[in-house]
Every structure is written in structure tokens, then in C-alpha cells.
Image: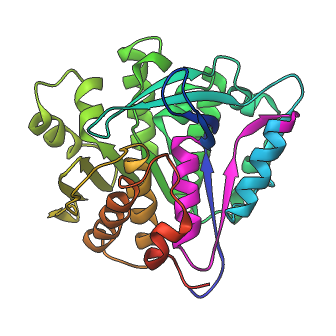
Amino acid sequence: MSATRHIAALGEAMLELRGPAFGTLQQGFGGDTLNTAVYLARCTPGCTVHYATALGDDGLSSELLARWRDEGLATDWVQRLADRLPGLYQIEVDAHGERRFHYWRGQSAARAFFDAPLTALEASAGQLDALHLSGISLAILPEAGRERALALMRKLRRRGALVAFDNNYRPRLWAGADEARHWMTRAFEAATLALVTADDHQALHALPDEAAAVAAAQTLPTPEIAIKRGPRATRVGGAALGWQDVATEPVARVVDTTAAGDAFGAGYLSGRLQGLTPAAAAALGNRLAARVIQHPGALIPRDAMRDLLAPA
């Protein structure tokens, strides 16, 4: 890229506890759009990745900010709110690397992000080349906040920015499936790129199987669509682009599937921002996701993906 690009990821970041109950727990941090932002910053030259969220004014929040800056994220659009705290989740992983989450996020500061009359994210929209958010980003917000997020998506799309929406459907965060379908439908209409996990799309629309979910995802109104199917080939394209299946990379031993989809999204966005075709971008996303699931936790060490990093 010839000039610095500004990319924003909007969502909720949480403290992460990993390990067995009443055993030795390791502390970290994660969150779907944060994971994507970190991997995107690592892999994409010539870009500034801003993370837009809200945190408390406590020591834990200050430490999160310091660690995000160490990862190369710009944190100038993070709000600090008195009497609020970051959310918390614990990961349990089974013998096959599949994970189970336990959340404490009801009073998460990120839920109040749009309580301000004008956020720094909205005020700086004119400098953005790309925006990334997810179904979780919308689910944690009150209705007025969701409307402002959608308005920002539409504004950016009108002036030609890349607007990526990842479905990431978590039923417990919504009042019901009808509510989730309503807001996600509107988000897909506002986005230029849909990142769709087939399992989530199947669950949201009560479809009989993955094939039905993939077929339904291919009819979304978003111009460009990448459909994630776990270890099966990723389907990418759109009504005007045609469709291609891009093979995933085999992994001998899956350690932890946490953030696999988030990593794919980062690789795909990085590729598209650097001018790769959708198929080549999907191959990069699959390569990064394969690397991530061979390590514990949402964010793997930089050294474990050194060969995938952008030149300094």
C-alpha cells in the first residue's frame, strides 16, 4: 500500500482466564473483534489499526490498554468510563481442542460505548478506509447504539470504504432469534464484506444442515461474502464475483479452536486491503487460522507466526 490506511475494529474486549476450574488459570485478553484487530495489525503493512471500545478507569483496564499498544493497536478511540469494568470470560478446552466459554459481561464497559453524544470513532469516520464489527458488537449494545453502529456502516459504505461484518451469533446475548435476525439482516445490508460462519448462520435461521446454511449465506445482499466451514473449504465470492472454494490447511493436532474465525477474518481483510483476490485472501486467512488453532488461547505469540508477519 502506498499510503497509511486507517482501519477500525468495533466491539468488546475482555479479560481471559484459561485453564481448568480450581486449577492453575492463566490470564490474558481477547474478544472477537479485538482478536481480528491484533492479527490484522500484525499482518498488514502500512496500516494503523484502531480499536474502538470502552473500558473502566481501573488498573486492569489500564493494563489492557498497555498490552494493546504493545501489539501495535491505536487506542485513541477507547473510552475510559468511571465505575465500569471490562468483561471477563473463562475458557475450558476439551481433548479435541473444542472450547467452552463462561462469561461475566453484564456490566461490561463496552456496552456503554455509544452513551456519549459523539464517539471518537464517529468523529473520525472521514479518515477510515475500513471498519470491522460483528454480531457480538451489535448484541452487547442497546438499541440506540446499534442504530448508530449501522449508520456508521452505511456512511462508510457510501464513500467507498471496506465495511466488514462477521456474523458471530451468540444466542445468549440476544433476547431471541428474531431480534438477532432483524439486526444482522440490517448489518449485512450495510456491509460490503460478509464474513459468515456457516454453523452460526445455520443456528440463527434454524436451517437443517450446513449445506442449507451455505446456500442461504450465498443469497445475502452483501457484495462480497466469505463463508467459513470449519475444516472444510472456505467458499468466497458474491453475486457479481462468482464463487470459489478455497481449501483449508490440514492440522495434525488441534490444540484450541478459540479465535480461529477471528484469525481467518484478519487474514482475509489483510489480503483484500493489500490487493489480493478473494481466493488468495481466503488462502491467507486459512493459513493464519490453521496456525492459531495449534496454540492455546485467543492470541498466539508473535514468534509462532513470524513467517506470516508483515515486514517491519
The image shows residue 87, relative to residue 210, as above or below, that is above
- Viewer-proximal residue, 159 or 44? 44
What is the quadrant of the N terminus in the image? Answer: bottom right
- Viewer-proximal residue, 172 or 65? 65
Task: Specify the quadrant of the image occupied by residue 86.
Answer: top right
The image shows residue 231 at horizontal and vertical percentages of 19, 51
Question: Is any atom of residue 24 visible in this view?
Answer: yes
- Answer left or right for 116 relative to 196: right
Residue lying at 45% horizontally and 48% vertically, measured from the top left: 296
The image shows residue 15, relative to residue 41, as above or below, that is above
Is 40 one of the magenta-colored residues? yes
Q: Residue furthest top?
A: 175
Task: Specify the quadrant of the image occupied by residue 149.
Answer: top right
- Answer left or right for 80 relative to 285: right
- The span picked out in magenta is 30-59
- Viewer-proximal residue, 143 or 160? 143
Is 80 one of the magenta-colored residues? no
Residue lying at 64% horizontally and 84% vertically, measured from the top left: 3
Task: Specify the quadrant of the image occupied by residue 30.
Answer: top right
The image shows residue 47, relative to residue 191, as above or below, that is below
What is the quadrant of the C terminus in the image? Answer: bottom right
The image shows residue 13 at horizontal and vertical percentages of 63, 39
- Viewer-proximal residue, 274 or 30? 30
Residue lying at 74% horizontally and 28% vertically, measured from the top left: 109
The image shows residue 26 at horizontal and vertical percentages of 60, 39
